[in-house]
Amino acid sequence: MKPKNLWFKISICTGALLGLLLFVQTVRTYQYVSDNLVRLEAGREADRRINSISRALRLTGSDQASTLTPVLQELVKEAPTHIAWIRIFNLDGKEIAESAKVPGAPVYKPGDLDKLLSNRSRRPEERDLVGGRVLITMAPMRGGPIGGRGGGRGRGPQDTAQPQPTADPQPPVEAFLPPPDAQPPDMGRAGGPPPSDGRRGGGIGRGGRGGRQLEIVEIGVYLNGVSTNFGPLQENLILGCSAAFALLGAVVLIGLRFRHYMRSKHMEEELSIARRVQLDLFPDQGSMVGNLAFAAKCVPAYHVGGDIYDVYRTDDGGVALLLGDVSGKGLPAALLMGVVQGAVRASSLSGPDQLEQAAERLNHLLCMKTARERFVSLFWGVFDSETSQLMYINAGHLPPLLIRKSGAVSEAQEPPDAAPRARGTTRSAASGGVTCASSSEVIRLSDGGPVLGLLPGMRYTVAIVAVEPGDILVVFSDGISEAANAADEEFGEERIIGSVERMPGRDPIELCGGILEDVRAFIGSEPPRDDQTLMVVRLEPAVRESWELGQNVESAVAE
């Protein structure tokens, strides 16, 4: 395993572990808030209500808890989403006062309350009611009437001799409620005050010295109502839990996709190598083959492309020119392009017949070995500098442009009424046809036949065009002429001609670079939709020997 891959896997494992720990910690914190803090807050809520009830009992000056029914009803009415009920019992389980009858509230038998209060490890009971889950808290009633008979908080026998004030009229219920900043007293483990030693009034038992019987307050608190106090905290915990889960999922997904990622990276490296191999198959940019100067460039839409171009010497001293376009893009088209280039290079091109036969063999090969959706358009020409002629076959490719200084635009093809040509004869390019406003004569080389690899048994015809000194041959794929801008307007053939006319007298390297620059400026930021291949060739006839030129001069003088 490579060190960089090992460190990557270690990082993935570490990230997954941290994400899992964060997720578990967030879930546990949420459970702690929901299970513990909410119940603690419910206990505090019950303590505050019990404190209010005890104060109300002292302020009324009555030693009968049954008179507190209006107070209990008012307390429940003030917080209906928090308080389910409030009831007061004696130790025999007899109900003394209640806020309202609630279905599902517990029923006690004699002795049950004494056992519950004596059990210090008891946890508050919870029940599910119609309004939600309820926490049931019980605690002894604190204190009694002011100056009452024992039962007071911290009152002993020595306090009973003090004069008792005259009872005032019962104050309103609001006077019984605790102030907002009141702190609840310590309720102990069972939710009530610390047990008394029996020497003071209000202890757990049947009463202190001279005190009244002990009452028990029971309060049912809605957990859902209390949990609203922790709403923002719970929302943050839910958000943190979701983020931890998303982080964990992302790290796990990256870990699972790591093998595919490495495979794709390996594939990219192989495509880069294939791109370099493909570039090595192309001739050197701006090189000279015989008397012929050329420049060519292929810009693939992907890593590798399906366009092909080549310039090489034939066995009989000519220069072969080749530019083709394989259907499709990417690696499949590039593989087929390599097959086509190898077959072309292996062909013998000593005359028109051999060129036609080579095209027919290549068509047969592609029809037999490739699928019907895979075909090749190809321009295949041979330039003979001795005869100043270019013979070619155009197999369904866009017509190359032979540009010379003149004013007409023509096609290199026979007139419609020409007789059929037998094998061994050639067609000559004739000037004429469509004309346009141009400062150059443009001959379109369109003769040959259909695309290769689509129709078995097709015959291909060679055409020959005479070349004059300084002629420029521009061969291009559809990625150049059909390059579209944001408005879906294509670059077109006329712009190619205009680019050449804008740079008269330039060498092929400058012409090729200028045309590609014009294409890039035309499409702007739009990515290329197809492979873009361009070849520019300056066709120059061979220079005659000096003695032959001298003989021609002498003949002209003699005449």
Image (cartoon, grey):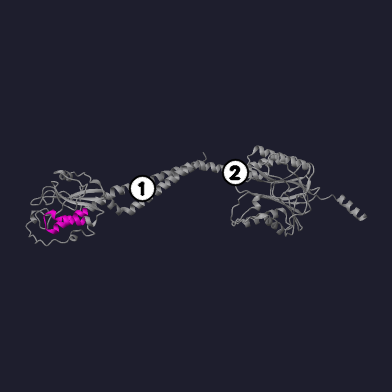
Residue 361 % position (x, y)? 71, 39
Residue 105 visible at all: yes
Query: According to the image, label 1 marks what residue?
Result: 26
Query: According to the image, label 2 marks what residue?
Result: 271
Left or right of 388 on screen, residue 272: left
Which of the labelled discs sits on residue 281, or is there none?
none
Residue 71 lies within the magenta run: yes
Q: Secondary structure at mark 2?
A: helix
Residue nearer the viewer, 51 or 463 = 463
Residue 184 visible at all: no
Left or right of 126 on screen, residue 509: right
**Mark 2 in CB contact with mark 1 (< 8 angstroms):** no
Residue 181 % position (x, y)? 23, 59
Residue 512 % position (x, y)? 69, 53
Q: Secondary structure at mark 1?
A: helix
Left or right of 542 on screen, residue 173: left
Query: Which is nearer the N-term, disc 2 or disc 1?
Result: 1
Residue 446 lies within the magenta run: no
Which residue extends farthest front? Answer: 417
Q: Amino acid at mark 2?
A: Leu
Q: Amino acid at mark 1?
A: Thr
